[in-house]
Image: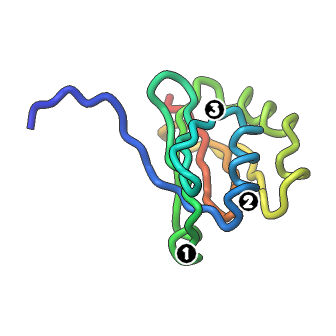
C-alpha cells in the first residue's frame, strides 16, 4: 500500500476519566474533547492519543506507550519537578535505564498505563 501516512494514534482507557483528563493536561498534553466519554490528547503537531472513559483491568495493566523524546535526562528532571507522582494516586516513576539501543525512563499513569519516555542513540 502506498499512502501518505500522517499520524498513528492509540486508544487508552481510564479508571477515572476525569482524573486521567487532568493528569494528561498536567503532563503537558492539550485536550480536544470529542464526546462526553472520549478526548484526543495532543502534544506536538502530529502526536497524540485517544483517552476514553472505558476501563478493563487486564487491558490497562498490559498497555504500554512509547514516547520518543530528544533528551531523556532532561525529560526525567522535568517529570520529577511536575510532581505528578505526588499529586495523583497510583502514579509511579522509574528512573532512567540505559540499553544498547538508547535510554528511557518510565511512568505509570493513574489507571496503570505504562509510559516509556525514550531516546535512541
Out of 96 and 60, give the one closest to the viewer.
60
Dot 1 lies on which element? loop
Neighbourhood count class around disc 2 (C-alpha, 10 Å): few under 14, some 14–19, many 20 upward: many
Out of 17 and 44, give the one closest to the viewer.
17
Residue 27 percent location from the top left of the image = 73, 38
Dot 2 lies on which element? loop
Residue found at x 84% / y 62%: 89
Do the residues under discs 3 and 1 have CB atoms within 8 angstroms?
Answer: no
Tell me: residue 56, above or below residue 111: below
**How far separated are the C-alphas under marks 3 and 2?**
18 Å
Out of 29 and 71, give the one closest to the viewer.
29
Residue found at x 77% / y 38%: 26
Mark 2 highlights which residue?
110
Mark 3 highlights which residue?
30
Residue found at x 69% / y 43%: 24
Mark 1 highlights which residue?
56
Residue 16 percent location from the top left of the image = 71, 64
Dot 3 lies on which element? strand
Neighbourhood count class around disc 3 (C-alpha, 10 Å): few under 14, some 14–19, many 20 upward: some
The quarter of the image holding the N terminus is top left
**How far separated are the C-alphas under marks 2 and 1?**
14 Å
Residue 88 image-quadrant placement: bottom right
Out of 100 and 31, give the one closest to the viewer.
31
Question: What label sits on residue 108 in the rendered view?
Answer: none
- Viewed as shown, does residue 88 lie left or right of 39? right
**How far separated are the C-alphas under marks 3 and 1?**
25 Å
- Viewed as shown, does residue 9 lie left or right of 104? left
Q: Earlier in the sequence, mark 2 or mark 1?
A: 1
Do the residues under discs 3 and 2 have CB atoms within 8 angstroms?
Answer: no
Q: Earlier in the sequence, mark 3 or mark 2?
A: 3
Amino acid at each position: 500500500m502506498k499512502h501518505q501516512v500522517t499520524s498513528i494514534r492509540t486508544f487508552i482507557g481510564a479508571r477515572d476519566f476525569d482524573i486521567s483528563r487532568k493528569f494528561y493536561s498536567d503532563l503537558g498534553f492539550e485536550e480536544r474533547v470529542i464526546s462526553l466519554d472520549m478526548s484526543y490528547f495532543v502534544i506536538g503537531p502530529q502526536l497524540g492519543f485517544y483517552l476514553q472513559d472505558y476501563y478493563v483491568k487486564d487491558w490497562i495493566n498490559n498497555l504500554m506507550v512509547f514516547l520518543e523524546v530528544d533528551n531523556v535526562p532532561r525529560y526525567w528532571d522535568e517529570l520529577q519537578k511536575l510532581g505528578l507522582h505526588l499529586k495523583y494516586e497510583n502514579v509511579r516513576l522509574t528512573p532512567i535505564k540505559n540499553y544498547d539501543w538508547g535510554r528511557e525512563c518510565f511512568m505509570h499513569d493513574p489507571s496503570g498505563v505504562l509510559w516509556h519516555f525514550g531516546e535512541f542513540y
